[in-house]
Each structure stands twice: as structure tokens, then as C-alpha cells.
Image (tube, rainbow, N blue to C red):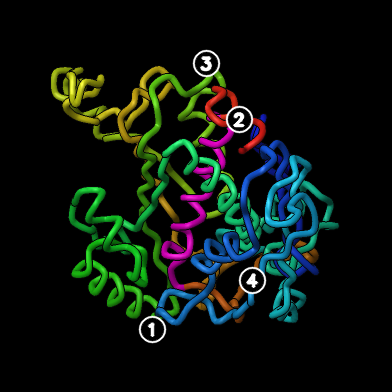
Amino acid sequence: MSNSFGKLFSITSFGESHGNLIGVIIDGCPAGLAITEKDIQKELDKRKSGDNPASTTRREEDKAEVLAGIFNGYTTGAPICLVIWNTDIASSDYTKTRFLPRPGHADYPSYIKYGGFGDYRGGGRFSGRITAGFVMAGAIARKLLKLIRIEVMAYTVEIGGVVARDMGFDEIRHNIISNPLGCADDEATRRMITVIEEANKQNDSLGGIIEAVAIGLPAGIGEPVFDSLDAELAKGLFAIPAVKGLEFGIGFEAARKKGSDINDPFIIENDKMATSSNNAGGVLGGMSNGMPLIVRVAIKPTASIAKKQRTVNMKEIKNARIELKGRHDVCIVPRAVVIVESVMAITLCDFALKAGLIPRIIK
């Protein structure tokens, strides 16, 4: 199992959904960065389950705790260890269905891979809960990127087939602050809530699409060919359990266009190189081209639903039925917005250190 990501700014994830705790170790963070538990908690609170109809009824406090690497309000240059203690655990339902792999979950392949020794409660290491560690690391990465004027932002653009209208980054930045679904379009939000409530009544779930953007990224960031900007970002984003697809810029739509339609002509804008369009999504040849880096992330519907489904009893080797009784999100897209944002920040922070844009000591 590989639980680490990144080269110079690297994170190691640990913990299980229903274990004592979950956490992350961050290695390579420069010394002298001003950071507090409050800064980390601010990002972590965005991932919490809430009162909107999409959220799970599991109510973890998700309080970030610093165990090492931050002293007197500054990073020391040593590995940073951040943890969250699990408190709202209800594992009895998982014990009853231990040998009944849940459709859409990693129960069966993980049971085979680890010989049944893995923590099966709530999905264990394969639960979306481990992404809280990504968010804590992302809070630190965002502060480092802010030092070099790189902004990372993510937002909901689609849920259950309801699509938000296109708008500029300034409007998006303003609108998503108080939106319950992390969407910049209030009218689309109302329709999204309606389809979420309907799916909930039907004991079903919904997926959607999150768009993430990095603004201020200079040209030339990326390490072709195997550690290219888009490849590394894709690797990090696919570590989020619910992610099933990615596209940069216009993505798959490029396959349906002519070169003359999608090439982004170079221009001079404010005495700097730019392109008149951004169909490439800010990436050319695995490197940033100075335009906003744009990626869309497809999030599948929550696999845990309260409908009866077919499965197999792995112990008795016979067909069976399963009906899940646990606490699950109807739609995890709103809570995944900050996770996508955090993974992008972690990835870009690693690249910025490789490029020498961030000093090893912050003064």
C-alpha cells in the first residue's frame, strides 16, 4: 500500500474511518511559516457534515490537533503531524455485514488483497473520511502558495444533472463564500437541493462535478514526462475515493473539435505573454503555460444507499442481499469541494518547491 504523495512537499496519510484517529504527516514544509490550529481548522470546517440535505448524520467534531512540527505559531522545518480523533463512531452495522461486500465500495478487493485482516468498519482506509488529512495538509499548502500569489479555488458546477451557469472567477469567488453546496449559481443551487431531497426520499444518492482553478501559476511549472503537472495532479485527485474522471480545459470536448477551433493563440496582455482563450486549461506538454489551471473532477454518487442490493456472502460463498443502515451522505459533492481544492494546493506546493519559487526558510 502506498500512503504517501509528493516529492519535496510530501504527505503521508494514516488512520481508519472507525479507528481511534485519522491524520497526516507533512514532510518538507519550509521553516518559518506562520500557521496555527485555527488556520487549519478553518479549512477543515468546510469539509464537515452540515445541515443541508446532502450531508450524513454522522457528526464528528473534526478538531485538528498539532502533535509535532509547529512551535510558537511557526513551522519548524521538521515533519508536521496533524491528527483528528474519531468520536462519533457507530460500528455495529458494519460488523453485521462484514462478509457482505457493499456494491460500489472497495470491500471485496481489499478483503482479497489483505486476507480479511483490514479494518472493515466504515470502509477503513478506503473511506472518504481519510480525506480530512488531505484538507489539513492543504491548509498549510495554501498558505505557502499565498506567499507567491498563487490562488487555488474549487466549486460545485453540477449535481444530479443540474448545471451551474458559466461565470467569471471574481463572481465565483464572491458567491461561493456562503453557498451551502459550494456552488456560485444561486438559482442552480436551489434546483440542486430539490434533486438531492428527491434522491433522499428514494433512499438513493447523487454525484456531480467539481471545477478547480489555480490562478497566478507562472509558466513552466511541471516535470515532463512522467511527473508532468497534469499527471501528478491527476494522481493526487484520483486518491480521493469518489473521483471517477478528470478533464483539463475543455477535456473530452477536444476530441470533437478541429485544431483551428481549440488552439489557444498567444497574445501580449498587460506586457505579458498570454493566450486569447484557455481551451488547454493552463497545461501544455505537461507544464503550466501561465494561464489559469482548470480541471474538472467527476464525483460518483455515494455508494452507500438504503436500497436493498444484491451481493455475495464471502464466507458462505453464496448469493445474498444487503440493505445498509449506516449514516451516509446523499451527495458528497459539497463536502468534496475543499478536498479537491486541498489536493490541488498540495500538488502545486510540491511543484513550486521543485521550481525554487518557495524558499526553504520563510522570513
Residue 116, which numbered label?
Answer: none
Could you tell me how far apart the alpha carbons at marks 1 and 4 are, in whole angstroms?
28 Å
- CB atoms of marks 4 and 3 within 8 Å: no
Q: Quadrant of the C terminus?
A: top right
Q: Nearer the viewer, residue 207 or 346?
A: 346
| Res. 70 in view | yes
First-in-chain label (1 vs 4): 4
Q: Label 3: which residue?
A: 225
Q: Tag 4, which secondary structure?
A: loop
The amino acid at mark 3 is: Val
First-in-chain label (1 vs 3): 1
The amino acid at mark 4 is: Asp
- CB atoms of marks 1 and 2 within 8 Å: no
Relative placement, left or right, of 64 versus 212 is right
In the rendering, at what x and y percent does residue 166 appear? 19, 51
| Res. 318 in view | no
- Range covered by the magenta-colored residues: 330-352
Q: Tag 3, which secondary structure?
A: loop
Closer to viewer: mark 1 or mark 3: 3
The amino acid at mark 2 is: Pro
Relative placement, left or right, of 151 versus 139 is left
First-in-chain label (4 vs 2): 4
The residue carrying pointer 4 sits among few (fewer than 14), some (14 to 19) or many (20 or more) residues within 10 Å by Cα, namely many
